[in-house]
Image (tube, coloured by chain):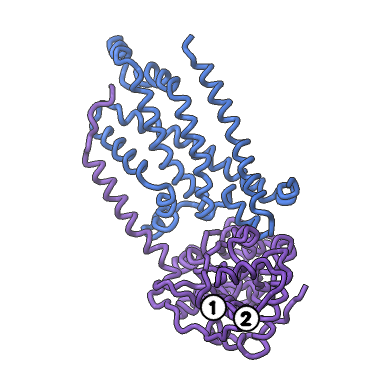
Chain colours: A blue, B purple
Amino acid sequence: MFSVLTDNWDLFGQGFWTTIKLFLISGVLSLVIGTLLGTFRVSPVPALRGVGTGYVNVLRNTPLTLVFAFLVFGAPKMSIELPSFFWSAVVALTIYTSAFICEVVRSGINTVPPGQTEAGRAVGMSFVQVLTVIVLPQAFRVVVPPLMSVLIALLKNTTIAAGFSVAEAGAIPAAMSERGENQLLTLTWIAIGFLILIVPLMFLQRWAERRTAVA
Amino acid sequence: MRMRNLVATFGVAALALTAAACGKSEPAAGGGGGGNASDSCGQLHKFTTASGVDVAGSPAFTKAKARGNLVVGVKADQPNLGYKDASGKRCGFDIEIARMVSAGLGLDPDKIEYKEIPSANRETAIAGGEIDYYVGTYSITDKRKKQVSFAGPYFIAGQDLLVRKSDNSMDAGKTALKGKKVCSATGSTPIQRVKDEQLTEASNISEFKTYSECVSQLLDKKTDAVTTDDAILKGYAANAPDDLKVVGKPFSVEKYGIGLPLADKALRTKVNAILEAGEGDGTWKAIYDETLGKSGSDSTPPPLEKY
């Protein structure tokens, strides 16, 4: 059982390293873009709200494979060039996950009592100040668990990139089969690999919940 | 500051329209490489079903005999090898080999139940008894011999390059690959060979689920060569002879075998005997000429390995 892993360490190591890179880069980008979109959706400017709503409704209802297929096969025909398949995958994962993060952040913002915002405005704070100093810190405290769920979903979604020329963990079974390795053991090791990646996220969630808990 | 009414603005409509447009352009892109409308299967070879066949001590045969037909694992997307046309008919060299074996086992080849098993699931499907045997560009390797057993080889292929017709820069074969973009199926042996022998730079390699997607990339000039066994490449070249060609400098030896359950020695002996008879009486040559032979290159039956 262990030989399946140790004999093919090159494949597993490289595959999971690519998975981690995909996850970290698109995770950070999605958090930034998702939060930005979340603020769009509650902003006083109707045009911004429209962009936010449109984006979320389109991306949340488009299968991720289709987003990938568009970026890899469709975009080049429209002369949209991305530097490599890896970056196509990052873009696909980011624009898809941002829609979900946006909604999580928005639900957090909605938990902040309107009196707080009004008080902020009353002491002369700007919209951006109210948002970053008063609203978002409280909103994030509430959304730690759902946010982590979205990130865990992102981690698992990275495996779709295997079909679009990114050699990450999802591409390991195909290569292992060509090497004549047992598929069941290969899949077991991949499952264990994902567990190892997800467990720290769970600890991070608990730590963040404790850290931000209201006494 | 709170979320007010849902604003169904123009933004939504505009984005939705863009998305619809994307959806339309995508299938055209995906189908560009593989699917010519004229790809349909013609007449299949006629086999005489043997009578009174018994394979003593073969569990797979006993099960198939009781069922009245064979269940055979195949591929469906390889023109002239294992192919299923738009009407659902199957044809190609591998299909004919599967039918020849069925006839030799005394079971009507027209009653074969085909199952499309992707490469990665072949061992599991054979070991789990999901299929009786597998015929689909299945290379005999020592590692695989530990999980399944092989009858054959019934064909010898070699890794080659498919390039655009106008491109003569890779005529020398694998040595000319340096600096060129190469595409093949995800994790496949050919692409692993390109990596191991460093035939080109890692950043020039792309891997997709199917060869058709690679062929699409080749036609779009996103890659310069598609690499895998020449048998598979010739099938694509035959579909687009004005745009594509096979370089014709094979740089590996792939022995295609029929995958059988590991413990079923009796069935393997019998299938080997059927292959040997077919090679001897000219059947092999006939089905080759009707399928892969149409590409213009000749071939002879390989010697069997009765291990």
Same chain, labels 2 and 1: yes
Residue drawn at the location 70% of the way across and 78% of the way down: B272
**Spatial CA span between label 2 and label 1:** 9 Å
Q: Give the residue type at disc 1.
A: Pro
Q: Is residue B45 above or below residue B162?
A: below
User: Could you tell me which secondary element the residue under label 1 belongs to?
Assistant: helix
- Give the image location of residue A111, x and y in percent: 35, 19
Q: Position of residue B259 (x, y in %)?
A: 65, 68
Is any part of residue B253 visible from this angle?
A: no
Relative side of A130 to B108, left or right: left
* A46, above or below B245, in the image: above
x, y percent for residue B237: 50, 77
B270, B302: nearer the viewer: B270
Q: Quadrant of residue A19?
A: top right
How many neighbours does mark 2 have within 10 angstroms: few (below 14), some (14-19), or many (20 or more)?
many
What chain letter is assigned to the residue under label 1? B
Q: Which residue is mark 1?
A: B109
Residue at 63%, 62% in the rendered image: B126
Residue A62 is labelled as: none
Marked residue chain, label 2: B
Q: Is residue B214 visible?
A: yes
Residue B247 relative to residue A153: left or right = right
x and y percentages locating residue B275 in the rendered image: 66, 81
- In this rendering, position of residue B43 left or right of residue A174: left
Q: Residue furthest toward the bottom?
A: B281
Q: Give the labeled residue for mark 2.
A: B104
Q: Secondary structure at mark 2?
A: helix
Q: Say whether disc 2 or disc 1 marks the residue closer to the N-terminus.
A: 2
Who is closer to the viewer here, B277 or B14? Answer: B277
Q: Residue at x 53, y 17 (%)?
A: A210
Q: Residues within 10 Å of mark 1 (few under 14, many from 20)?
A: many
Q: What's under tag 2, amino acid-wise?
A: Gly
